[in-house]
Amino acid sequence: MPPSGPGFSFVSLIAVAAAVIGLLGGSRDGYGQMVQLTFAGVIGREGTGAGQLLEPAGIAVDPAGHVYVADTGNHRVLQFDANGRYLSHTGGFGFNAQQFNQPTDLAATGLDVYVADAQNRRVQRFDRHLNFISTLAISTLAAGLATPDQAAQPLGFPRGIAVSPTGEVYITDAENEEVVKMSTAGQAEVRFGGFSDGPGRLRNPAGLAVSRSGEVYVADMGNNRIAVFDRFGGFLREMGNKNLAVPEGVDVDDQGRVYIADTGHDRVIVFSGRGELLLAFGVWGTGLGSFHAPRDVAVDRTGMLYVVDTGNHRVQKFAVRASQEAKPSN
């Protein structure tokens, strides 16, 4: 088990991975680089006080480096700075504006923070300082959907949420096992993933992410995979179906690498955009570099990876480094 305590800081997870699962790197990504991770800190600890967490489920990082955590067990959202220092929070259990009932995910654009308020069947929108702006009730989303048949189907529990580079909002509806896409004007445009038994059929979808190119990556828990769609909901491909167990969270960095909270295996997996396994690390445990049912991941623009270590009531932070692998001489 990785060492822990006051004397433990900045331990290379290359060594951790070698010690606990014997898997490092995996292969080069599309840029011919090997991915390495280094432990960089912990945010939060178990509790109900300021800066403390209870079974957190979701995370987002805005372009300025502010970290927002869905503190599910405490029915609130917490904000931290890039160094992990607690800044503020909003919420508390309830049904009114600026209250939550088990928030499960969020998305941060730098201007707005969208929160999937799951058991209240709505999305709440805040500014970057967590001042309330508006509420979007899930029952009202149907009015903007593309066809009468789609609009007739009531929407259920929002589980995951992500915002595309061009401002569209994507929401996973866990009850109806589909994704809803909203336009930049706030109107629902299309639903996908839940209307057929084809390869794009989702089963218990959770977190999702949108790449720089507009591809939508969905943590398809019930199918033990990541399902990838185009921006219109057309199914493109899947990844990880031979490696994952009930994955709940996913994110994509600017180089197209895909980071997955492999919840059922208590670990994190990294794939290239082409689906090549680059790195897997973590085992069940309470030490640093170990996880207990991690439910979400987020990677920021500086190459920091945040892992929501739900069962340990914390967020672990890792620096991502891609190093050029030397090519053998002929």
Image: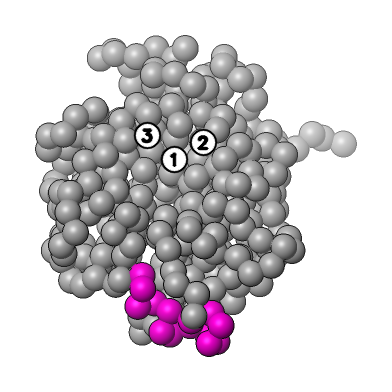
| Percent coordinates x, y for residue 4 in the rendering | 34, 14
Residue at numbered disc 3: 310
Regarding mark 2 in the picture, which secondary structure is present there?
A: helix
Question: What residue appears at the point 51 percent right and 29 percent down from the top-left corner?
Answer: 266
Please report the bounds of the magenta region as a residue range.
Answer: 138-151
Q: How far apart are the two marked residues, 2 and 3, measured between alpha carbons?
A: 10 Å
Q: Is residue 126 left or right of residue 182?
A: left
- In the image, is residue 143 part of the stretch drawn in magenta? yes
Question: What residue appears at the point 63 percent right and 38 percent down from the top-left corner?
Answer: 244
Main secondary-structure element of the magenta-colored stretch: helix
Residue at numbered disc 1: 295
Mark before the other along the chain sequence, 2 or 3: 2
Marks 1 and 2: in contact by CB < 8 Å?
A: yes
Mark 2 residue type = Thr
Mark 3 residue type = Thr
Q: Is residue 163 left or right of residue 134?
A: right
Q: Quadrant of residue 264?
A: top right
| Percent coordinates x, y for residue 298 in the rendering | 42, 48
Marks 3 and 1: in contact by CB < 8 Å?
A: yes
Q: Quadrant of residue 50?
A: top left
Q: How far apart are the two marked residues, 2 and 1, measured between alpha carbons?
A: 6 Å
Q: Nearer the viewer, residue 222 or 317?
A: 222
